[in-house]
Image: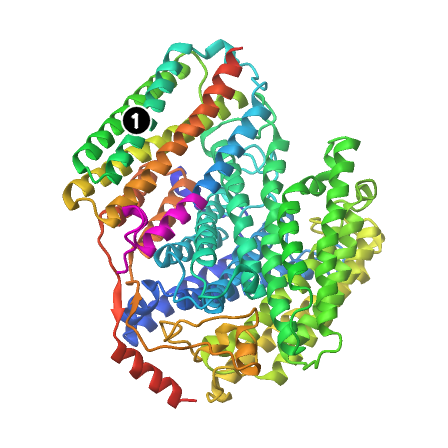
Amino acid sequence: MKLDHSLPLEYRTEEGQLKILGFWIFLGAEIMLFGTLFASYFTLVDRVGSGPSGAEIFEITPVLIETLVLLTSSFTIGLGIHAMRLGRKKAMLSFFAITLLLGLAFLGVEIYEFVHYVHIGAGLQTSAFTAILLTTLGTHGLHVTFGLFWGLFILLQVKKRGLTPETANKSFIFSLYWHFLDVVWIFIFSFVYLKGMM
Amino acid sequence: MEFFERFAIPHPSAPIYASMVAIALTIVAIIAGLTYFKKWGYLWREWLTTVDHKRIGIMYLISALLMLFRGGVDALMMRAQLAVPDNKLLDAQHYNEVFTTHGVVMIIFMAMPFIMALMNFVVPLQIGARDVAFPRLNALSFWLFFMGAMLFNISFVVGGSPDAGWTSYFPLAGNEFSTSVGSNYYMIAIQIAGLGTLMTGINFITTIFKMRAPGMTLMKMPMFTWSALITNAIIVFAFPVLTVALAMGTMDRLFGTHFFTTNNGGMDMLWANLFWVWGHPEVYILILPAFGIYSEVISTFARRNLYGYKSMVVSMVLISFMSFLVWVHHFFTMGQGALTNSIFSITTMAIAVPTGIKIFNWLFTLYKGKIEITTPMLYALLFIPLFTIGGVTGVMLGMSAADYQYHNTMFLVAHFHMVIIPGVVFAMLAGLTYWWPKMFGFMLNERLGKLAAWVIGISTLVAFMPMFFSGLDGQARRMYTYSASTGFGPLNMISFVGAIGLAVGFAIIVYNVYYSVRYASRDIGADPWNARTLEWATHSPVPEYNFAIVPHVKSAEALWDAKKKRHILFQGDYEKIHMPNNSGVPFIMSSIFFVWGFAMIFSMWAVAIIATIGIFACMAHRSVEIDHGRYISVRKIEETETKLRGAK
């Protein structure tokens, strides 16, 4: 295996470089995926049928908690990658663990929110608006859920195998994914919730 | 009992029962054959678990050819039904299912894998790489496509095929008007295959960006590789739109949501828009690699450098942008209003400009060339006039005011067949013939090849030109019959004759393969066409590591200049070569996807949940697995090279 020591650990193998570029392209596809969901959301947002509108069901408190928790988790995973670059495995693992716990908290609040919506009569089958709302939020939520499992697997691997070019590469790619979910959430927060509550 | 009724076919008929028996017998025959000849191990080791881009390419090719015949039989059934007025060969429901599956099979399960086949086989060789960037992902792409295709194809014997057209417009495709599970098949099977396609897109962009041979800058890439790059970029940006649309359609059908319904706020036109935001770029996903093949073939057999290399690249980039800006022209008549229609009319006509540039570049490449008419070249030369007929009628359809006259008539059907058959199918046949010696180490018979090209070329005109006239006369597409008083009878009979001609042409190709397997010389060397690009610089058939020494490239016509200007491609000594290990996980994971898809289609939730867990278990396995690949030793390379050189 050829190693280029002038680069950070995660870029050191050629395979690692390929994987990082490939993942960026994948994120391009993810932008299209969420872009399509947003476009559909804006198309259907006023088509509430006999169901409630956004302004009637959105509550600011859980949304603010979700936002704070997720933004913080994006910060902590950044710290985690920074620690990884410094070669401090223990600090990195702690930051990754904090990130995943925050992700879990986000998911908990989101599940509460969904239960609440269904409870007040804004279920998946109520109207085109509720369907696209829950689908957009749900797609993001499923990404977070997937990320929790993925992150856990990486955390365990770093713990067991140490910081190698492979584990560093995996961790770095995971951090890209996690930051991306954060970016998507900023759009959801601004254009679904805030705009909906105005 | 109710549980089992869902698996029955809604409109059974004798041919369907016959095909059920045929499918069962084929499966038994395959299993018995593999067991009798003790080939299970071989199949598993060499094919099902392979991550070699060349073998994956060949598997794509076999699947594409199988699907070509499936879609072709559909086409023959339709033309036979319409050949005479008031025909009773097929009933309306059966006809609906046949035209729906014809469209889906031909576009998604024939043309796409055919392109994937040639891209997989050729692109890594053309850029001097040893494999794609993510070989195992590549295997997963193939198997997902394959399982999607299988799932779609069992629909006509289990539960009924989709019957809402290949565009599957809602509300027709919704639960209210499509009560069988047919449209579920559509939503789920295409979703699974589409995931595979998206992965291919990511894989090939990374490969082309990062794995080119030293010295091959972007502007020195062969034109087919350029077309593959642009195509995969379109794939990455278009397919997620389809993913979302299909997911919404699935939810409407299975979970009772109201995305595309006509009540509770649902919006049926949202489907049409999303479908074509994917669907129009999809047209260019099909045609750009075809253009790439024609560029290679024309420049090889005119013995000239491609005219206007830079303008070729620029026009492909322009086409890829504009392909996302024309989707509304597929439904001008569905009430957008004059302003919207005008805008999309203009973008539609504008996209003909870069396409025209490419046509002229090919003509100028031919001009003053030492043209040699081989089978691939014959397809390329037939393509230019025939495709122009299709293209110009496309501009006619693109004028929104006039489109009200043509919309959903046979004129439209004639137009898109005249672009897709000369554009895509001829290109695939040209590419198949052109790269066949590289794939299998012998050439297809030229005399039979040219005969097939002429038969297919002329039959295309005979089959589709009459439709322009019957369409202008008012014959609507997708009507399963018509009365004698309409006067459409003779024109449709001519079309039927053309369809038979096409069938004969493809039969000649099959015979050609058989004939060449038996009689063609195996002593053809590495470069039988006297070609210009790197794939012809290594042996035929290609060793698993592609190039014993990584080539150094100085120009866009690397091999040609090596031959004419004495550039040295290969210098240095053999070094051990790193190769990826085979893996059964892509096949297993895709098989679980098949089970998942089937369970979803029939709303068997417990099975679907178990399969979902299985899919994630495969991903978890991949996450913790340690696989550093393997090395081919210098001694092994020397042995292989000596053997291959000896065979020359």
Q: Secondary structure at mark 1?
A: helix
Left or right: where does residue B491 sit relative to residue B47? right
Q: Residue at x 48, y 17 (%)?
A: A193
| Residue in the foreground of this view, choosing between B569 and A65 | B569
Give the residue at mark 1: A103
Q: Is residue B504 visible?
A: no
| Magenta stretch: includes residue A10 | yes
Q: Quadrant of the C terminus of chain B?
A: bottom left
Rate crowding at label 1 as few (under 14), some (14 to 19) or many (20 or more) other CA atoms within 10 Å: many
| Quadrant of the rendering where the N terminus of chain B is positioned | top left
- Residue drawn at x 35%, y 82% is B641
Q: Position of residue B50 (x, y in %)?
A: 34, 64
Magenta part of the protein: which range? A1-25
Q: Nearer the viewer, residue B643 or B303?
A: B303
Query: Can I make out residue B633 in this image?
Result: yes
The residue depicted at 66 percent of the width and 62 percent of the height is B423
Name the amino acid, label 1: Gly
- The residue shown at (38%, 90%) is B646
> Is B590 on the left-hand or right-hand side of B334?
left
The picture quadrant where one finds residue B327 is: top right
